[in-house]
Image (spheres, rainbow, N blue to C red):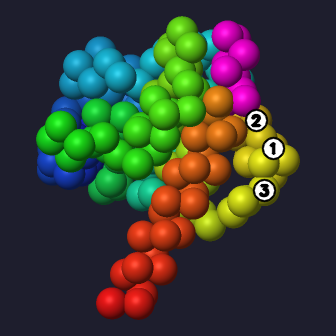
Amino acid sequence: MSLSISLTINGDARTIVLEDPRVTLLDLLRERLQLTGTKKGCDRGQCGACTVLVDGRRINSCLTLAMTVDGAHVTTIEGLATGDELHPVQAAFLDCDGLQCGYCTPGQIMSAVGLIAEGQAVGDPERVRELMSGNICRCGAYKGITEAVLAAMEKDATIFKERDAA
């Protein structure tokens, strides 16, 4: 039984025919659409390597059936940068050495983007660590990751202040 779904992925509207309604969003993104920036880690929702944004909310794409997000806006790591200009969170991860091996980095960055958009944990390192706890880094880059999230939050707050003052 095939099923047709419509998604907006990284700003591009797509209609996709699913041959198997059991396909996960992660497998659809990686295997079918070749958006391989989203990583398959544990495939059980425990490591967070597969984190993407669906309608602005962070989710584990390995635990999400693609058909359940029909009509949604999906943002992957490939959708953050604008041309050659990195998203502020991507730039902060580089500046703060939050990368190490890099395998978990796309999920960490997507989770950080979602966390910042949620307006949680502004300037609170402990809260950032707690809210990022669904994303596991086996290399131990947590210090740099936390610093990067806080730096991106500060830059984001500055942008909003400048925008509000104008």
Residue at the disc numbered 3: 124
Q: Secondary structure at mark 3?
A: loop
The quadrant of the rendering that contains the N terminus is top left
What crowding class fits label 3: few (fewer than 14 Cα within 10 Å), some (14-19), or many (20 or more)? few
Gap in Å between the C-alphas at discs 1 and 2?
5 Å
Do the numbered discs 3 and 1 sit on residues whose CB atoms are within 8 Å?
Answer: no
* Quadrant location, the C terminus: bottom left
Residue 137: name its quadrant.
Answer: top right
Q: Residue at x 48, y 63 (%)?
A: 156
Q: Identify the residue at image location x=72%, y=30%.
A: 143
- Element class at badge 2: loop
Disc 3 or 1, which lies upstream in sequence? Answer: 3
- Residue at 81 percent across and 44 percent down: it is 130
Q: Is residue 20 visible?
A: no
Q: Which mark is residue 133?
A: 2
Q: Residues under labels 2 and 3: Cα distance?
A: 14 Å
Q: How far across and how far down the image is residue 86, in percent? A: 30, 41
Mark 2 and mark 1 in contact (Cβ < 8 Å)? yes
Q: Is residue 137 magenta?
A: yes
Magenta-highlighted residues: 135-143
Q: In this image, 45 relative to 12: left or right? A: right
- Between residue 25 and residue 110, name the one nearer to us: 110
Q: Between marks 3 and 1, how big is the CA–CA gap?
A: 10 Å
Residue 113 in view, yes or no:
yes
Residue furthest right in the image = 126
* 19 lies above or below 78: above
The residue that label 1 is drawn on is: 130
Q: Earlier in the sequence, mark 2 or mark 3?
A: 3
Q: Amino acid at mark 3?
A: Asp
